[in-house]
Image: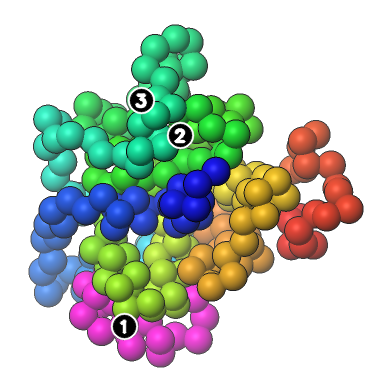
Amino acid sequence: MKPSLKYFLLTTILASVLFPSPPPVFAVSDDERGDVVSYSALIRENTSVAKKRSDEVEAALEIISAGRDHQSAIEITTRIKTNLPEIDPKATVRVPEEVLNNLIREGDDYHDLQATLRPLLKFYGLGGRVLPVLFKSEMPVVGSSAPNGLMVSTRAVALLSKKELRGIVAHELCHLVVVDVFRAAIDARDYRTLRIIELFCDAGAAATMEVLERNPKSVINGLLKLQQVLEMEFDERDVEGKHPTTSTRIRLSKEVIGRFAPETRSLMVAPTKAFTPHSHTPSSSFL
Ligand SMILES: [Zn+2]
């Protein structure tokens, strides 16, 4: 695996930095203070707003703050929907060369992937605008080439259930809402803001999966599967702290899931056959 792709894999939407495209336009108004967009704008304008908060989970929860039930998930997804960038359906999708060289553009796997993601893309009005791109790789990859490419490797398809795959793709779509904040944080090496963005995307994706399938836990379950394989087989670790720790992500997910669907609070990350404890299982934070 080439270093360039490895770098891309762990940072997913970084593809948008490597393959720059015009930044999406946000519509931010003063009276939206407190919602997803205004908080994003605050982060963009002054990252000290985020730094004042001692708890990144709390910061992410504040971004998605709403009521404490299924209705709140609907409100959150409505905010996400209205703040997605406009995407030209005719725009070219740009992907890393290694993805391009391993493209799969026909066959059952290709059509299965399109069918799996169609309801989610339709939900966000992105059908025909954001294109799922399947490519052959032993590495489990789900990444965004913002604004209009969703790269999914064959290993990811094999590893994840369809619900988990949709959950992770929902996380990638949430990145589109905060893509310019993300780029600014990358430039500034502002890892704390990057971690909050990841948590925001986890929470937004959980809300999405709650609304779509009443299954918000598919997001964290899928993320943990990907992370575990990346660590165990590819020795991929986020040593710089660009991503939240696993335990932080789990904590946020429990909070979010507890809000939307209290009865599912205890249902987290059932171990699967593929993840029988190993001598080099990364950490005890995998439940
Ligand atoms: Zn992310």
Residue 100 found in image quarter = top left
Q: Which residue is drawn at 32% across and 78% down?
A: 188
Q: Residue at x 24, y 35 (%)?
A: 93
Mark pair 3, 1: CA separation: 36 Å
- Counting the numbered discs, the total is 3
Q: Residue at x 30, y 73 (%)?
A: 187
Name the residue tied to disc 3.
118
From this view, report whether residue 202 is shown above or below residue 170: below
- From the viewer's perspective, tell me whether residue 26 is left or right of residue 69: left
Marks 3 and 2, the one that precedes in the sequence: 3
**Which is more toward the observer, 1 or 147?**
1
Q: In this picture, which residue range is highlighted in magenta?
A: 39-56
Name the residue tied to disc 2.
152
From this view, report whether residue 63 is shown above or below residue 80: below
Residue 61, disc: none
- Is residue 52 covered in magenta? yes
Q: Position of residue 211 (x, y in %)?
A: 42, 40
- Residue positioned most to the front: 2
Closer to the camera: disc 3 or disc 1?
A: 1
Mark pair 3, 2: CA separation: 14 Å
Q: Where is residue 89 in the image (x, y as percent from the top left)?
A: 14, 31
- From the viewer's perspective, tell me whether residue 208 is left or right of residue 37: right
Residue 76 visible in rendering = no
- Is residue 174 covered in magenta? no
Residue type highlighted by circle 1: Thr
Name the residue tied to disc 1.
47
